[in-house]
Amino acid sequence: MADRTPLRGRGHYKAWRAIATRWMDNDVYGHVNNVVYYSFFDTAVNAWLVEHGLLDIERGPLIGLVVETGCTYARPVAFPEEVQAGIVATKIGNTSVRYDIGLFVKGNPQPAAQGFFVHVYVDRPSRRPQALAPEWKSTLRKIAGPDAG
Amino acid sequence: MADRTPLRGRGHYKAWRAIATRWMDNDVYGHVNNVVYYSFFDTAVNAWLVEHGLLDIERGPLIGLVVETGCTYARPVAFPEEVQAGIVATKIGNTSVRYDIGLFVKGNPQPAAQGFFVHVYVDRPSRRPQALAPEWKSTLRKIAGPDAG
Amino acid sequence: MADRTPLRGRGHYKAWRAIATRWMDNDVYGHVNNVVYYSFFDTAVNAWLVEHGLLDIERGPLIGLVVETGCTYARPVAFPEEVQAGIVATKIGNTSVRYDIGLFVKGNPQPAAQGFFVHVYVDRPSRRPQALAPEWKSTLRKIAGPDAG
Amino acid sequence: MADRTPLRGRGHYKAWRAIATRWMDNDVYGHVNNVVYYSFFDTAVNAWLVEHGLLDIERGPLIGLVVETGCTYARPVAFPEEVQAGIVATKIGNTSVRYDIGLFVKGNPQPAAQGFFVHVYVDRPSRRPQALAPEWKSTLRKIAGPDAG
């Protein structure tokens, strides 16, 4: 019944972020709760955008709204392990970008989970979609997959 | 680029749970963060299972592991609004169940988001998938959609 | 070694807010994690301020910054129990307010936890403390304890 | 009205843990929400205990229950900054330990916040307090402050 997408290795991803797990990430069954994985997605994508000068959380004219996300869970993760989140832009559209994210436990070549995250970029005051400026597109190409457009 | 599944109204869902939003659910853009929606999914499904005698979080022989989830975001939600989560079992398999979840703001007929949540039920000590017992299947049929099997 | 403050019953509090627990609130030991209690504090105080017209999260000129909090834990809480948070303003200062909060499980007269939460009210753009306007003080007196000033 | 305890510098603490902030840690005012600081406390203390062989989250005979916590907030922290959490055991009792925690933004000598966290160690099945074994006490002395007992 689960997603039949094959699991992708570390080579699929173009940029990485290390994220410490937290005590409260573990749920009653002793592993990081399924919800928290999306926080790793959110963190990996937004941190990359901030650190590459595209997103200014407080003052930038553009903000990214999330319109769709999904995740397939392959192996458990548990505090205090460190998560390494890989990202790749798989579709660079006119106003939106789709990112694939892979989550790996430090030292393990097999993914713990993989998913996607679709951002629509909107004007901050009106919240209307905005065409991505050339510097956004050229910067995003640094982490683009082969068919990202 | 987003999921083209049509948005489903309240009539699609078979059971409901009210969930208070929390101050910290709102992110820097003033709305409930995309991650938190999955916490509403998790809460609605598990609460229903606990309250219908299927899941005993501390001592039950069976636990539900999440293998796949996804969400399409349609309208923002903001603290202090109340969320109403509707659930319907759309696929009752041998060892797994797929639930659709719709999130609505109290008083609004239009969904704020919709998604799905796939649980595989496993034996607690071995974490191996277990065939669902007849009482699980008969109880789950109370919230089954037309093609749930 | 813990705080020797006696536990206070429901009669100590002046306003109430019901908060649904969530699946992921439970930590690996099967009870709501200690961190989450502070989210209940935050939610109860801010919801009261919003619903009484004092705080406008998006546009109001004043925002509340948290400068100190504390909590004593008395009894465990577990999902899917409902939490009832009682609040009382125990010190209404010139620019700050101290609230006591008691957390109770629905149906139980004994507190699960009690704590406090100190807000300093600041001008949104400058983040400088602002003297509370007369309508703030008069509204806050509706939930003031006997020595709140 | 806030706690008059003087702010303590990095030299007060005996062990450190780096914790990545996450996108959703930022609240609507653009800074890490007050609740999340307690997650840093929880994480720093428990990670130290796990990594020094005292706590085995899944199977250990002893678990740590939190009986009291508190925090004074001094400077804002914002995603994507990295938090460095310092810990020191300030009271090693018979069945409980009090830890002081200081939170610092990477590169800043001034604390963003400081607080405390009191654990009572209990027998896992009965949840009754247990006297700390000699190896617990000797290991904890590696991070003990001058008056920890």
Image: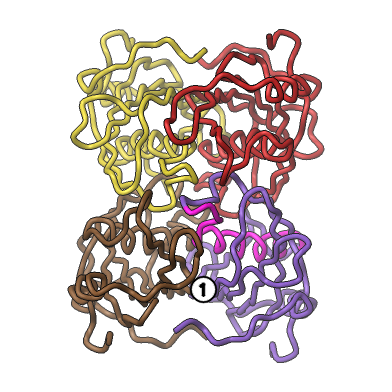
Chain colours: A purple, B brown, C yellow, D red
- Residue under the point 33% across and 29% down: C112
Would residue B13 be found to the left or right of residue A149 on screen? left
Residue D60 x, y percent position in the rendering: 58, 39
The residue depicted at 58 percent of the width and 79 percent of the height is: A96
Compared with C28, D94 (above or below) is above
For the residue pair C117 and C28, the one nearer the viewer reads as: C28
Residue D135: image x %, image y %?
71, 24
Residue D11 or C55: which is nearer the viewer? Answer: D11
Q: Which quadrant of the figure contains the C terminus of chain B?
A: bottom left
Q: Against D4, is B82 above or below? A: below
SS class, disc 1 = strand
Q: Amino acid at mark 1?
A: Thr
Left or right of C123 on screen, residue A80 = right
Task: Give the dominant element type of the magenta stretch: helix, strand or loop.
Answer: helix
Placement of C103 over or under D97, stated as above or below: below
Question: Residue at position x 69%, y 53% from top?
Answer: A81
Look at 31% across and 61% down and name the residue there: B44
Residue for badge 1? A69
Chain ID, mark 1: A
Is residue B73 something one can see in this rendering?
no
| Image location of residue D105, percent across then percent down | 73, 38
Among the 4 quarters of the image, the one containing residue D96: top right
User: Residue D121 sits in which quadrant?
Assistant: top right
Q: Please state the horizontal and vertical placement of residue B29, each as a whole percent of the image.
A: 50, 56
Membership of D5 in magenta stretch: no
Q: Nearer the viewer, residue B77 or D20?
A: D20
Relative placement, left or right, of B81 versus D43 is left
Q: Which residues are magenta?
A: A29-52
- Residues D8 and D56: in front is D56
Would residue B98 be visible to someone looking at this image? yes
Q: Is residue C106 above or below residue A81?
A: above
Classed neighbour count for the residue bearing mark 1: other residues with Cα under 10 Å, few (<14), some (14–19), many (≥20): many
